[in-house]
């Protein structure tokens, strides 16, 4: 199942946005392209940050979890290698990176979009609960990145794999 949300103002965007939850439910999984795996907060205006700093991405992950579907994370090759190497160096590296995810500070180009999503967040149980749901889903998806690396015969160490699998228990 493929979907695309119109990003430009107008009737088409509002219709797409209003049915995002339904569209996600019709798909078997959500594929999340993440430019960087460990930067969820901007340190400068030119800093590249994870999609987890954007309210729409957080909302899409929430919809995926509520539908009971898989979240699959794809990282650019250099980021994927950096992620696997970081797991080998420090067991808490992914956990520490995701600790900065916060639905309250997530940004949206359109302030009305954020207001609408935050209303749904309240209905689900509030920002703290949604943040926890998103972090748990990302822990699982990042663990799968390491598992796929091992399955594809890459040189991901046992330590990286064990560390990644422990993310699922957090």
Image (tube, grey):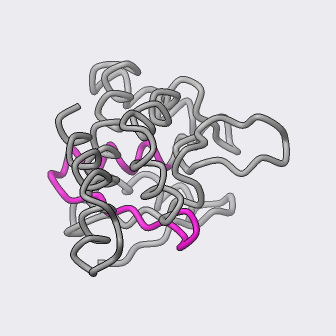
Q: Is residue 43 above or below residue 141?
A: above
Q: Is residue 140 above or below residue 16?
A: above
Quadrant of the rendered image containing residue 92? top left
Where does the image place residue 135, in percent across and percent down from the top left?
35, 36
Q: Is residue 89 above or below residue 156?
A: above
The one nearer the camera, 131 or 164, is 164
Where does the image place residue 138, in percent across and percent down from the top left?
35, 46
Identify which residue is drawn at 35% across, 72% down: 155
The one nearer the camera, 147 or 57, is 147
Identify which residue is drawn at 19% across, 69% down: 28
Range shown magenta: 57-79
The one nearer the camera, 17 or 104, is 104
Quadrant of the rendered image containing residue 156? bottom left
Residue 106 lies left or right of residue 144; in this view the side is right
Residue 45 lies left or right of residue 114; in this view the side is right
Task: Determine if the magenta segment contains residue 77.
Answer: yes
Where does the image place residue 49, in percent across and percent down from the top left?
65, 47
Question: Looking at the rendering, in which quadrant would you find the C terminus?
Answer: top left
Quadrant of the rendered image containing residue 1? bottom left
Where does the image place residue 112, in percent across and percent down from the top left?
62, 36
Identify which residue is drawn at 38% across, 28% down: 131
The one nearer the camera, 155 or 20, is 155
């Amino acid at each position: 199942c493929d979907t695309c949300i119109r990003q430009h103002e107008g009737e088409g965007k509002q219709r797409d946005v209003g049915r995002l939850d339904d569209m996600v439910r019709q798909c078997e999984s959500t594929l999340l392209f993440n430019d960087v795996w460990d930067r969820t907060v901007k340190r400068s205006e030119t800093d590249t940050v994870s999609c987890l700093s954007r309210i729409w991405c957080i909302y899409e992950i929430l919809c995926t979890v509520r539908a009971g579907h898989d979240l699959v994370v794809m990282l650019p090759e250099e980021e994927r290698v950096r992620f696997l190497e970081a797991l080998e160096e420090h067991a808490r590296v992914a956990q520490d990176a995701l600790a900065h995810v916060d639905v309250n500070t997530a940004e949206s180009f359109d302030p009305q979009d954020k207001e609408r999503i935050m209303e749904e967040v309240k209905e689900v149980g509030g920002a703290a609960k949604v943040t926890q749901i998103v972090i748990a889903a990302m822990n699982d998806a990042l663990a799968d990145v390491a598992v796929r690396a091992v399955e594809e015969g890459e040189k991901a160490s046992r330590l990286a794999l064990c560390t990644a699998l422990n993310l699922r228990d957090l």
